[in-house]
Image (tube, grey):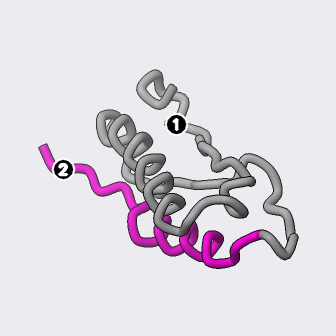
Amino acid sequence: MIGKGYADSLLLADNIDPQAFVCWSPEKIERKIINLLQEVKTPLCARGLHSRCAVAAGCEVLPALSTKLENIKTVIDTTKKCGQVECPVS
């Protein structure tokens, strides 16, 4: 979709299964975020788009006692660290 120009004028966001915030380890969440960001960065760079990526949960994150706050923090920290699109200069 990005390669066809859909990201030129609108925001594209992939999502994370909300159950991941309950069931996954912070390391698994971090790998998922890095993979999502890389999946978006490659076609954005191919189109010369230098912007930030958005990462979102597929639905609301339940405010349950079983929701791991460290997983929410991992999503935020990983997106801040790896979310800037830095395309190589050609």
Of the numbered discs 1 and 2, the one sitting upstream in the chain is 1
Instruction: Identify which residue, 3 or 8, lies in the foreground.
Output: 3
Label drawn at residue 88:
2
Residue 52 in percent (x, y) is at: 47, 57
Q: In which quarter of the image is residue 60?
A: bottom right
Please state the horizontal and vertical placement of residue 40, each as a whole percent of the image. Answer: 44, 42
Q: Residues within 10 Å of mark 2 (few under 14, many from 20)?
A: few
Q: In which quarter of the image is residue 3?
A: top left
**Residue 44 in the image, given as x and y percentages of width and height:** 38, 40
**In which quadrant is the C terminus drawn?**
top left
As displayed, is residue 65 above or below residue 32? below
Q: Is mark 2 on a helix, strand or loop?
A: loop
What is the spatial separation of the Cα atoms under label 1 and label 2, in whole angstroms?
19 Å
In magenta segment, residue 70 = yes
Confirm or deny contact between disc 1 and disc 2 (CB under 8 A). Answer: no
Q: Residue at x 54, y 29 (%)?
A: 6
The number of numbered discs placed on residues in the rendered structure image is: 2
Q: Which residues are drawn in magenta?
A: 67-90
Image mark for residue 66: none
The local secondary structure at tag 1 comes to: helix
According to the picture, the residue beneath numbered tag 1 turns out to be 7
Against 86, is 13 above or below?
above
Residue at image point 37% right, 47% down: 38
Residue at left offset 51%, top offset 25%? 1
Q: Residue furthest left?
A: 90
Left or right of 15, for residue 83: left
Residue type at mark 2: give it. Answer: Pro
Name the residue nearer the viewer: 68 or 56. 68
Residue 20, image x, y percentages: 66, 56
Under mark 1, the amino acid is Ala
Instruction: Answer with left or right where residue 69 lies relative to residue 74.
Output: right
In this view of the protein, which residue sits in the foreground, 32 or 79?
32
